[in-house]
Image: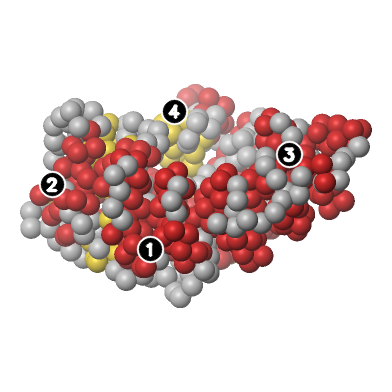
């Protein structure tokens, strides 16, 4: 252990009382970020009382990497309570070799709290040489609290040598035993990520028909049932949920574009008295093993979620440890997961296995796989977005409600990111795709998305209430709702748009759209001569809209006096 001498607190430069008070008031303001001229003095405030130190730490973290040099300069002569606080803040700054090297020297520090903060910081930061430094300290550690911290850090930032050491660690302390088991589990999964790939097998077929539960936006259930067709024997189960039966491969579901989640429910089990053990039994049951093994390429990796909400970290680790004992090949991995297991911990226990890594794309060398984890191959064209853009399943619902006619000239007056045009073009043939918007940036995003989808469209900067596109047979759009763009009362905008759309549409044409104000827009549509064919109340996430299909009659309606 280092015997590095320390400088007494009085040796540090004292701040004038007026300067100290002014800075103390400043750091308490969440909007204050210390500049370079203030950093040295702000660092000194870390030695103050606990409440002030919390404000100072937050202010230094707002300064980010710029705070690093001031903290590093102060650390060699700092004494507690300043010394461990300096280390804690350094550990939360962005990656920096100078900081990492200094934290490694603090593993042998004379102050116990400084050592503990350095251990925790290095475990979270990782980086070159960190695993070796932590392991070297752990092999010599005699303090039980510090050994616990080292074991926990090695679980996050260790290597193969650390796993070997953890496997051989003998401990009488129950807490150290628990931390060791958890660290071994974490390290084994992180070391296995590069060795054993994992993705959903879209072409596998189970030996017997498999029950499914598909989630969708509440209000789209009937459209989803219709889209699934008799092959899946769909039936409404509740708001936003449709039950179905899978007889072929999962790939067949990719042709259905209205669902947001696919769940493969497991046969329920009794909860019993030991909840972690019961959940582990459900995860490793014959039904679960058959599902995991059938639809997974490589090693099945999962993460737990809770149908009744809330994080339950302690329970997750207990379940993961119990499941690993029963089935070591099943790996709990919340970062690079293949399956999300949604558990309803009522009695009986229920769970759904939800595919995550669909396997439609594979990361290139060095690519961040976190963005691929939830990649949905149905909407791979979507590389750009704009504020208040449609969710692609809502755009797909609009296209389905509008129906496909090969001679359609399709116009989206509020084209945004172009998802409605993409979904209509992908659903079936049409004569032309037209899009307008007042935002040139939105038009650029729409052009990219349409190109990614393999579609050609004519995009124009124009006003939806006055633009007169020629030969339009279908208007399809998700207009501004008055929340993120065109804030305030959108009634006048929408009624003006409806009147213009009715005038633009050829006889026999259709308007498929979402109205946030049906009491305002319905009379306007009727006055313009449109006839409502279908209307569904749709959950838009915090408010409702009406998903509507209006038709323009082939012949204008005759007045009652002449009928």
Residue 81's disc is none
Task: Please report the residue visible at 21 percent of the width from the left and 59 percent of the height from the top.
Answer: 329
Task: Please report the residue visible at 86 percent of the width from the left and 41 percent of the height from the top.
Answer: 14
Q: Nearer the viewer, residue 296 or 547?
A: 296
Q: Relative to 174, is 282 on the left or the right?
A: left
The mark nearer the N terminus, 1 or 4, is 1
Residue 285's disc is 2
The mark nearer the N terminus, 2 or 4, is 2
Give the tally of numbered discs.
4
How far is the residue under mark 1 from the one under mark 2?
Answer: 32 Å
Residue tagged 3: 47
- How far across and how far down the image is residue 52, in percent? 72, 32
> The C terminus appears in which quarter of the rendering?
top left
> The N terminus appears in which quarter of the rendering?
bottom right
Residue 162's disc is 1
Closer mark to the observer between disc 2 and disc 4: 2
How far is the residue under mark 1 from the one under mark 4?
Answer: 89 Å
The mark nearer the N terminus, 3 or 4, is 3
Residue tagged 4: 563
Q: Nearer the viewer, residue 516 or 183?
A: 183
User: Which structural element holds mark 3?
Assistant: helix
The mark nearer the N terminus, 3 or 2, is 3
The mark nearer the N terminus, 3 or 1, is 3
Residue 98 sits above or below residue 173 on the image = below
């Amino acid at each position: 252990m280092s015997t590095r001498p320390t400088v007494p607190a009085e040796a540090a430069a004292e701040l004038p009382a007026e300067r100290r008070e002014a800075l103390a008031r400043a750091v308490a303001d969440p909007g204050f970020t210390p500049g370079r001229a203030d950093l040295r003095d702000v660092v000194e405030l870390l030695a103050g009382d606990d409440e002030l130190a919390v404000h100072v730490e937050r202010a230094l973290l707002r300064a980010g990497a710029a705070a690093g040099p001031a903290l590093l300069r102060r650390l060699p002569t700092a004494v507690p309570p300043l010394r461990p606080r300096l280390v804690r803040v350094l550990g939360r700054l962005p990656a920096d070799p100078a900081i990492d090297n200094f934290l490694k020297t603090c593993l042998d520090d004379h102050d116990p709290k400084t050592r503990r903060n350095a251990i925790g910081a290095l475990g979270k930061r990782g980086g070159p040489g960190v695993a070796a430094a932590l392991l070297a300290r752990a092999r010599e550690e005699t303090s039980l609290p510090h050994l616990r911290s080292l074991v926990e850090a090695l679980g996050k930032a260790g290597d193969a040598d650390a796993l070997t050491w953890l496997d051989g660690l003998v401990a009488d302390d129950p807490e150290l035993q628990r931390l060791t088991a958890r660290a071994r589990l974490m390290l084994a999964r992180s070391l296995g990520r590069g060795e054993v790939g994992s993705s959903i097998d879209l072409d596998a077929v189970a030996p017997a028909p498999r029950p499914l539960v598909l989630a969708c936006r509440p209000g789209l259930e009937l459209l989803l049932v219709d889209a699934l067709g008799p092959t899946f024997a769909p039936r409404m189960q509740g708001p936003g949920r449709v039950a179905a039966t899978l007889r072929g491969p999962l790939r067949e579901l990719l042709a259905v574009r209205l669902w947001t989640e696919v769940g493969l429910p497991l046969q329920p089990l009794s909860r019993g008295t030991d909840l972690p053990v019961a959940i582990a039994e459900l995860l490793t049951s014959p039904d679960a093993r058959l599902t995991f093994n059938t639809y997974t390429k490589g090693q099945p990796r999962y993460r737990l979620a809770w149908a009744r909400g809330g994080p339950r970290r302690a329970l997750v680790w207990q379940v993961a440890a119990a499941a690993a004992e029963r089935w070591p090949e099943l790996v709990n991995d919340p970062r690079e997961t293949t399956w999300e297991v949604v558990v309803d911990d009522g009695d009986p226990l229920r769970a759904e296995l939800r595919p995550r890594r669909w396997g439609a794309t594979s990361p290139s060398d060095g690519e961040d796989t976190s963005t691929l984890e939830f990649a949905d191959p149905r909407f791979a064209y979507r590389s750009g977005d704009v504020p208040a853009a449609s969710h692609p399943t809502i755009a797909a619902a609009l296209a389905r409600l509008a129906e496909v006619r090969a001679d359609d000239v399709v116009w989206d007056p509020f084209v945004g990111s172009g998802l409605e045009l993409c979904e209509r073009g992908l659903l079936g043939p049409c004569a032309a795709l037209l899009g307008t918007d007042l935002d040139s940036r939105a038009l650029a995003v729409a052009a990219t998305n349409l190109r990614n989808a393999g579609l050609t469209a004519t995009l124009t900067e124009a006003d939806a209430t006055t633009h007169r596109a020629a030969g339009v047979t279908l208007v399809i759009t998700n207009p501004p709702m008055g929340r993120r763009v065109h804030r305030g009362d959108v009634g006048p905008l929408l009624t003006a748009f409806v009147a213009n759309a009715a005038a633009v549409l050829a006889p026999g044409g259709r308007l498929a759209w979402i109205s946030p104000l049906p009491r305002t827009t319905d009379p306007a549509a009727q006055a313009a001569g449109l006839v409502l064919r279908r209307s569904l109340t749709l959950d838009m996430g915090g408010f409702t809209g009406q998903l509507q299909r209006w038709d323009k009659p082939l012949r204008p309606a005759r007045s009652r006096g002449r009928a």
